[in-house]
Image (spheres, rainbow, N blue to C red):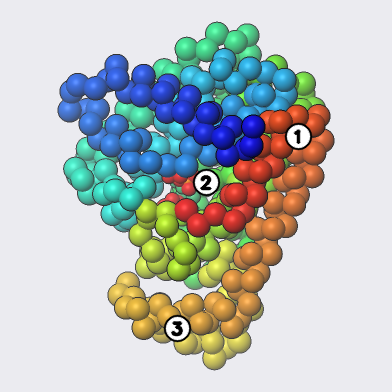
Amino acid sequence: MNPTDYIQILQQKIESVLLDILDHQKSGMLYKPMIHPLQSGGKRIRPLLCLLSAEAVGGNADRCLQAAAAIELLHTFTLVHDDIMDHDPLRRGHPAVHVQWDEPTAILAGDGLVTLAYQSLLLNDHPNLIEVMKRFTQGLLILCEGQALDKSFETRPSVTMEEYRNMIYKKTAKLIEVSSVTGAMLGNGTREMIHSLSQFSEELGIAFQIQDDLLDISEENISGKPQFSDLIEKKKTFLTIHFEQTADEACLQKYRSLTQNRHLPPRKIRQILECFTDSGTLDAARTAIHESMDKALEHLHLLPHTRSRDTLEWMAGKIRDRNA
Ligand code: IPE
Ligand code: IPE
Ligand code: MG
Ligand code: MG
Ligand code: MG
């Protein structure tokens, strides 16, 4: 079976567990805004990583389905709150929860989604469940730390690349790492296998976020998220930091005047993109993505060769080249 078909089978299993969880919650006004973002789409990368990691260590993906669903529920919660924090009106091609309803509703929908995530994870009766829960909970706390850093960087005049990497490790890579580790632990992987998958998914997560930064300004972006939101919100991304570090004084002056206020008409956007291209920033971002992905694969190759390992490698390539 080719990787696309295999991924599709796993995706269908994930959808069916999520549907099952939501079916029980269908009625009542709390639930509609929780169901809305989950049924709006989403690539389901994290639950897929969980299932494939379980299999890559010799475990059974079907025994991890509730945990995989828990990870997607948790991720969806972070998106609902992230869109409030980032003032983004669109998510997965549909109005964000705080736009479709209002902010109080979106805050509560997020709370409900975290709760469902824990409820789903607790359905597993694996002897290591407590350890899995510890990592899941620690991962969530680190993600919150990352979101706090991301927010605080908006008002900082400058941020170093090291600070940025620490921030994206926390806000994005950590949950991606937790996804793999959850699968590997529930799949009874050895310590070495769990460690390799942890390192693999951490590097994958770093590449994933740099690619996400790039997509914000990319013409090929079909993510169903608003474009140029990072620029408008004055986010510190790989692009802005690299540009600030490498551009000459004249380019910097031009860039600063272009990004002075939140109004970014197409003419200004075009000029900003020119700045990023001329300074080599876009190329540097692509190189950084490839470097992290190569490191990720080195860790992955420490695992025994199986169909699931091949599928993880295939997925990594898709993530590296994605436009959504
Ligand atoms: C978006 O994650 C949030 C980031 C960490 C960049 P995804 O790009 O995986 O979003 P969905 O789940 O496919 O919508
Ligand atoms: C998201 O970072 C990280 C989390 C949701 C925790 P972004 O703010 O860049 O994600 P998008 O671009 O809105 O999906
Ligand atoms: Mg955001
Ligand atoms: Mg954000
Ligand atoms: Mg983003």
- Give the residue type that dot 1 points to: Ser
Residue at (36% x, 47% y) in the render: 92
- Give the residue type that dot 3 points to: Gln
Q: Residues within 10 Å of mark 3 (few under 14, many from 20)?
A: some
Q: Residue 53: percent from the left, percent from the top?
A: 65, 29
Image side of residue 116 versus residue 210, left or right: left
Dot 2: element: helix
Residue holding disc 2: 171
Label 3, label 2: how far apart the Cα atoms are = 30 Å
Residue holding disc 1: 196
**Tag of residue 271:** 3
Image side of residue 240 versus residue 128, left or right: left
Within 8 Å of ligand 2, the CB of disc 2? yes
Most extreme residue toward the bottom is: 250
Residue at (79% x, 44% y) in the render: 298
Tags 1 and 3 in contact by the CB under 8 Å rule? Answer: no
Image side of residue 275 versus residue 196, left or right: left
* Of the image marks 1 and 3, the number of the one nearer the N terminus: 1
Quarter in which the N terminus is drawn: top right
Using the rendered view, name the quadrant where residue 63 is placed. Answer: top right
